[in-house]
């Protein structure tokens, strides 16, 4: 199983100081959600963990080993990624896309074997896309493509999964299906999540980032209260707790309601 520790992480992109000394710990099999307003540094943090970006300072440890000690291929055996943007200039079938997830486990020019094809089909089945195996990836909708990218990540058979706003482009049914699938894996998950209700439903811990700094870290009930949501997003909300499941439900108050009420009071 995988533990992830981020210490004193800083990154500059051009003249912009994006991450400012972040410290975060994700335990074995924990599902940690990263929340925060646009531009706060959520995706940048994830890209440092899966090595698309190189931090200016700080360390990232996988099971107490510095991630820099691993080759990129070794890292891909430990961490799989589902990112926001998945555009390709070549025509690939869905099965070809998912089989790419087996690449870290293959030697140079080694062909796929029966086990690889079995893993590929099992991964497609987990995301409800088994019947799409022979379709062209480019012919799929954005939501369907996102589910295939998840299947590719599942095919890597890693102990850690990184998700960058994974429910974008998905309708409600498939948002829940995707998150259920991820939750059922029993592995370490770090996910940037836009929807606070999704975060409250699925995350063990929530890490809130604003202006490149972690400003709160804890369980959903510790982090998601109306005062903190106002601080983080500058919006008003009401929060209720389901008596049966204990899950939080967050309802946002649109600003125009205040304007309408103010106008009515003046009449």
Image (cartoon, rainbow, N blue to C red):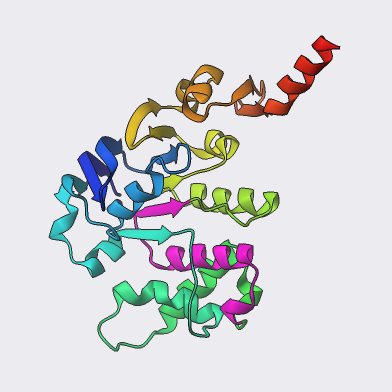
Q: Please state the total of marks drawn on the protein image.
A: 0
> Between 6 and 156, which is closer to the camera in this rendering?
6
Q: Tell me where residue 237 appears, x and y as whole percent.
A: 62, 23
Q: Magenta includes 137?
A: yes
Identity of the residue drawn at 36% across and 27% down: 215
31 displayed left or right of 140? left
Residue 263 seen in render: yes
147 displayed left or right of 35? right
Q: Is residue 160 above or below residue 217?
A: below
Q: Quadrant of the C terminus?
A: top right
Check the image and name the residue furthest to the left: 69
Identity of the residue drawn at 49% across and 58% down: 84
Which of the 4 image quadrants contains residue 178? bottom right
Q: Magenta includes 163?
A: yes
Identity of the residue drawn at 46% across and 72% down: 119
In the image, the segment drawn in magenta is 136-164
Identity of the residue drawn at 56% across and 62% down: 126
Q: Tell me where residue 68 appears, x and y as whole percent.
A: 15, 57
Residue 128 seen in render: no
248 displayed left or right of 35? right
Q: Is residue 31 above or below residue 152?
A: above
Which of the 4 image quadrants contains residue 128? bottom right
Which of the 4 image quadrants contains residue 205? top left
Q: Tell me where residue 228 appears, x and y as whole percent.
A: 48, 21
Check the image and name the residue furthest to the right: 267
> Between 196 and 64, which is closer to the camera in this rendering?
196
Q: Tell me where residue 245 appears, x and y as whole percent.
A: 63, 28
């Amino acid at each position: 199983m995988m533990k992830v520790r981020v210490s004193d992480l800083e990154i500059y992109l051009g003249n912009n100081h994006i991450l400012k000394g972040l410290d975060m710990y994700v335990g074995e099999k924990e599902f940690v959600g990263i929340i925060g307003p646009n531009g706060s540094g959520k995706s940048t943090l994830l890209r440092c963990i899966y090595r698309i970006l190189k931090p200016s300072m700080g360390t990232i440890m996988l099971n107490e080993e510095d991630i820099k000690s691993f080759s990129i291929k070794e890292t891909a055996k430990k961490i799989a990624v589902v990112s926001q943007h998945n555009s390709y200039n070549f025509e690939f079938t869905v099965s070809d896309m998912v089989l790419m997830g087996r690449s870290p486990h293959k030697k140079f020019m080694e062909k796929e074997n029966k086990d690889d094809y079995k893993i590929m089909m099992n991964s497609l089945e987990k995301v409800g896309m088994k019947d799409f195996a022979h379709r062209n990836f480019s012919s799929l909708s954005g939501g369907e493509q996102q589910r295939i990218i998840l299947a590719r990540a599942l095919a890597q058979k890693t102990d850690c999964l990184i998700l960058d706003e994974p429910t974008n482009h998905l309708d409600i049914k498939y948002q829940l299906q995707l998150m259920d699938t991820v939750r059922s894996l029993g592995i370490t998950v770090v996910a940037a999540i836009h929807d606070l209700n999704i975060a409250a439903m699925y995350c063990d811990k929530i890490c809130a980032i604003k202006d490149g700094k972690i400003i709160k870290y804890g369980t959903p009930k510790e982090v998601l209260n109306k005062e903190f949501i106002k601080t983080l997003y500058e919006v008003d909300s009401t929060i209720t707790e389901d008596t049966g499941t204990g899950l939080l439900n967050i309802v946002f108050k649109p600003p125009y309601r205040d304007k309408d009420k103010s106008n009515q009071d003046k009449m």
